[in-house]
Image: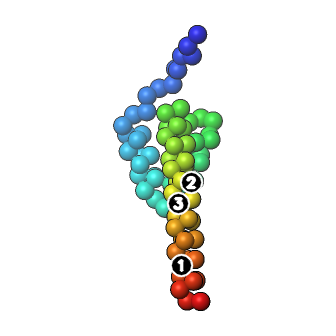
Amino acid sequence: MEEQNNSSVVKTSDWVITLLLLAIPLVNIIMLFVWAFGSGTNPSKANFAKASLIWVLILIVIYAFIALVFGAAMFSAFS
C-alpha cells in the first residue's frame, strides 16, 4: 500500500527565503543541519538540505585530496 504524503507544498516565497539564508556564510551550514534533521521541517526542504549536505561533504573530500596532493608536491619540490 502506498504511503500518502500530506505535507504541504513549499511556496515560492519560502524558497526565496531559504536561498537567501543559504547565501549567508556560516548561517547556511547551521540552517542546512536544522532543516535536514529538524522534526518540523517540510519533507521537501529536508530532502533538499540533506542533498546539499551530501554535496558539501563530497566537495570537502575533493578539496582535501587536492590540498594533500598539492602539499606533497610543494614539500617534495622544496626538499
- Return the residue at label 1: 73
**Badge 1 or badge 2: first in the primary sequence:** 2
Which residue in the rendered view is the most extreme toward the top? 1
- Return the residue at label 3: 62
Q: Are marks 1 and 3 in contact (CB under 8 Å)?
A: no
The Cα–Cα distance between marks 3 and 2, rounded to whole angstroms, is: 9 Å
Q: Name the spot of residue 39 as percent of width and height, x first.
A: 63, 36
**Badge 3 or badge 2: first in the primary sequence:** 2
Q: Name the spot of residue 49 as percent of width and height, x first.
A: 52, 43
Residue 49 appears in the picture as rendered: no
The kind of secondary structure element at disc 3 is: helix
Which residue in the rendered view is the most extreme toward the bottom? 79
Residue shown at the point (59%, 48%) measured from the top left: 33
Answer above or below: position of 78 versus 25.
below
Q: Which sits in the foreground, 28 or 58? A: 58
Amino acid beneath label 2: Leu
Amino acid beneath label 1: Ala
Category of crowding for the residue at label 2, using alpha-carbon neighbours closer than 10 angstroms: few (below 14), some (14–19), many (at least 20):
few
Q: Name the spot of residue 50 as percent of width and height, x first.
A: 55, 42
**Labels 1, 2: front one:** 1
**Badge 1 or badge 3: first in the primary sequence:** 3
Residue shown at the point (55%, 49%) measured from the top left: 53
Residue 59 appears in the picture as rendered: yes
The kind of secondary structure element at disc 1 is: helix
**Labels 3, 2: front one:** 3
Render colour scheme: rainbow
The Cα–Cα distance between marks 1 and 3, rounded to whole angstroms, is: 17 Å
- Return the residue at label 2: 57
